[in-house]
Amino acid sequence: MSSTPEQARARPNIPPPAGQGAPLDAANDASAVVNDVGRIVAWTRGAEETLGYPAAEAIGQSAAMLLADPGDRFRATGIAEHCRTGAGWSGLIQARHHDGRRIELTLRVSASFHLGGDDCYLVSGREQRSQWSMGQSGVDWFLTRSPVGMAVMDTELRYVWINDTLERFGGVPREQRLGKRLSELLPGLQAETLEEVMRKVLRTGMAVADYEYLGWSWADPHRQHAYSTSFFPLVDAQDAVTGVCYMVLDVTDRWNARQLLSMVNEAGACVGSTLDVMTTAQELADFAVPRFADFVVVDLLEPVLSTQGHGTWLSDAGPAAARPLMRRAGMSSVREGCPEAVARVGDRVDFLPPPRDVGLLVNGEPVLIPVIDPDHPEWTVQEPARASRIREFGMHSLISVPMRARDTILGLTTFTRSQNPASFDPDDALLAREVVARAAVCVDNARRYTREHNATLTLQHNLLPHILEGGTAVDVASMYLPADAKDGVGGDWFDVIPLSGARVGLVIGDVVGHGISAAATMGRLRTAVQTLAVMNLPPDELLAHLDDLVIRLGEEEPDDATADQNHMSVIGATCLYAIYDPVTQRCELARAGHPPPVVVTPDGDVSFLELPPGPPLGLGGLPFEAIEIELAENSLIGLYTDGLIEAGDQDIDRGMARLGSALAEQHVPLEMLCVNAVGELPDAPQTDDVALLLARTHALTTDNVASWDVACDPAAVAGARALATRQLEEWGLDELAMTTELIVSELVTNAIRYAPGHVRLRLLREARLICEVTDTSSTSPRLRHARTTDEGGRGLFLVAQLAHRWGTRYTREGKIIWAEQNNP
C-alpha cells in the first residue's frame, strides 16, 4: 500500500510499539496493528483475553486467520481500501476464537498511518453481548410484587393504582383505597403533611426523595413504624404533569437503630455533667422521661453512696429472702411530684423485679416485663404497695436494668410506661441497657471522685493546724480559701510554732499546684519546718535546710514526667519564716521568694517590710538573709500567700494596697480582720489558693522576767538556787520551788563545769515557768543512762523527769539550756 504526501501529513502520528512482539497496554478492547499486507505487527492484552491468542503466537501471522467466515476476506480488502483514503470504519464482524468458537465483534478500523516504513491500521474490537429484556408480564409482576410500596395518585391526590406491598403496609384493602385520598384512609400517618409534599411535586414538577416520617397503620396499630418515601411527578407526551407516583419503604429497623445510637449518644452528653453521685442518678432519670419512659427510678447500693465505700449491700435475712440494701438516688415522672413512687429520694429501698433474683445485680441481664399483671401473686403478695400504684396509674410495661461499671455493682434502674400505650419490646431493653451502661460509668466516676476527694480533704485537714496557739507572745487568727471551692485542696499552708524562751515561730508557705499532690507536698514541708523550728534555728538557716530538702524531693521525682501524672514537682515553693520574742519585742524574719509581710502599728500605720527577697525553694546555691525588727506591743503582723494580692486584676501593688486598707482598722477582732481581708477580693474566678495568718504581738513585762549573772565558781551554785527560790516566792510559785532548785542546780553546775566563762540564769513567768542558763560553750549536753558505778551523768536525766520539756538552743555567743515546768 502507498499514500500521497498530503494523505501522510493528514494522518495521525501514532508512535511505534516499544518492541516487536510486545503487547500494547493502551486499551481494554481487543486491539491489534495490521500492516498493508494483512500481517499482525502488534497485539494487546485485551486481544489476548478476547480472542485467546497469545502475542507470541499472533504477531507475524495473517489477520485472515481471525475471520470466522472466509468470505469476509473480500470485505476486509474493501475496508482497507476505504481506510487508505484517510477515513476510518466501524461495523460488526464474525471472528474465530483460539478455541474455535465464533465471536461477534464490534470492530473499529483507523485510517492508515506510517509505522516502520509501512502503512498500517489500528484495529480494535469489543465482543457483542446479548441485551436482556423483560416483557410486559415481567414488568407487571415487578410492579405488583416489589418489596417497595408503590402508588399512583391523580392531580386531586386520589389513589389510581397501588401495588400489593403498599396494601400490606397500610392494612387498607385496594378496593377501599382507589378513588380515596390518603388523609381519608390513614389519619395517623401524617397524611396532611404527606399530601402537602405531593402538592409541591405537582406544583413544581420536582421530585422529593427519601422523605422519612413516623406513623401508625391499620396493619400494625400497636406499633409505630418509620417509612422512607420518594415522590415524583407523572408527565404526558406534552410534559404536562398528570399525577404523582410515590414509592414507600418500611425502614423501622433502620430508624430504631439510628434512634438507639442517637439516644445513647445524647445520654452521654446529658448524664454525668457533675461528679456528684446523686446528681448523676437524677440526670439519668430526667433524661429518660418522657423520651423513653413515663416513670423512672434509680436505686443505688448503700456502699456506693457511702463516702467510706465499704459495708454489706445485702440484708441480714436468710439467703432465700435476701434483698439488696439500696437507697433511692433519683426518680422522674411525666406526672408532677412522681405520685407513682412508693419511696422518695433518699429513702431505703429493696425492690427487685420478678423473679426477684439477687443475682440480677451481679451478672444478670435486663428484666423485660412487656405486660404487667398487678393481680399476679408476684405483685399482690410480695409488692402490695407497688401493685396498688400500678393499678392506680395504669403502669403496664417495665424494664429493670442492673447498673454495673468496671466490675463494680452499683444499683438498679427501672423504667415503666403508663401514658405511652406502646409496651416495651426487646429493642427497648437493648436501648435501656446501653443508656444505663453509659450512666453507670458516670456514676462510678462520681463515686470514685467523691471518695478520693474526701480522702484528699481529710489529708489536708490533718496536715493543716487544727488549733493555732501563740501562747502569751501573740494572738493569732487565720483564713484559708482554696482556688477551687468544690475541690477545697491546695498547696498553701501556715503554722504557729511555740519555741523555747516564750518565743513563737510564724510560718507561711505556698506549693505550686492544687490537689492531693500539692497537699501531700505541703504536708512534707510543714513537717520539715516544725522539725527545724524546734531545733531553734534562726530563720535564714531554717530556710537553707528547707531548700536542701526541696532539692532532695525534686531528685526523687521520676525522670519521665509522664511516668506519674499525680506526682507534683515542689520546685517553685515559697516560704516566709519569722520568730517573735515577747521579752525583747523583736522579730527576726527571712523569706524564700515569698511576698513580704504586712505590719500595722498600734497607731494604724501600715507598711510592707523591706525583706531581702531570697530565691524560691529548690533552686539551691543561693543564700537567704534574715533581718530583725522591733515590734511595739499590740502591733499586727500579717503573713499571706500571693493569691491574696494577685487575685482578679493581677496587679500586685493594687492587691497590697487593698490588703493594707483592710487590716488598718483598729479595735477589730483578728478573725473579723481575716474575713474582711479575704472579702475584699475582686469578683472574678480565683486561680490561686489564698492563705492569711495574722498575729497581734504582746510583750512579756519586766515583772515576769528575772535574770542574774552567775560567777564561774561551783560555790555560786547555792547562791543561784537561793535567788531562784526567792523569785518564785515573789511570783507565788512556791509549789515549784523544790523542782526549780534541782533544775537550776543541775543546769548551772553543768555550765560552770563544762563551759568556763560568762554564765547567766534567767526565769520567765508566762503560761509555763521557764528556766534558762546561758554559757559561752557551743557543746550541747546529752541525756545518757548512767551506770551504777558512775559518779555523775544523772543530772540531765533528773531534769528531763522534772520538766515538761527541755532543750538547747544556740546563740552567737554560745548556747542556752532551758527547761519548762507547768504552772500549778
Image (cartoon, helix red, strand yellow):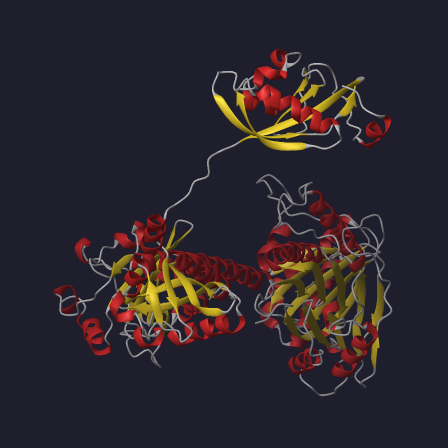
Q: Where is residue 645 in the image (x, y as percent from the top left)?
A: 76, 73
Instruction: Using the rendered image of the protein, determine whether residue 306 is visible from the camera's viewpoint.
Output: no
Instruction: Tell me where residue 542 sits by quadrant.
Output: bottom right
Question: From the image, which quarter does the N terminus lie in?
Answer: top right
Q: Quadrant of residue 312?
A: bottom left
Q: Is residue 635 toward the left or the right of residue 782 in the image?
A: right
Total marks shown come to 0
The image quarter containing residue 823 is bottom right
Q: Nearer the viewer, residue 143 or 10?
A: 10
Question: On screen, 339 above or below 245?
Answer: below
Query: From the viewer's perspective, is residue 506 above or below residue 551?
Result: below
**In the depicted view, which residue is nearer to us: 245 or 448?**
245
Question: In the image, what residue occupies the spot 24% across and 77% down?
Answer: 393
> Seen in the image, is 373 located left or right of residue 201?
left
Residue 12: image location, x then y, percent: 78, 31
Residue 812 in the image: state x and y as whole percent: 84, 56
Residue 812 seen in the figure: yes
Q: Horizontally, is 201 left or right of 320 in the view? A: right
Q: Quadrant of the C terminus?
A: bottom right
The residue positioned 61% from the left and 20% from the top of the image is 74
Q: Nearer the viewer, residue 607 or 44?
A: 44
Q: Which of 308 and 74 is in front in this view?
A: 74
Furthest residue toward bottom: 667
Q: Position of residue 428 (x, y in %)?
A: 33, 60
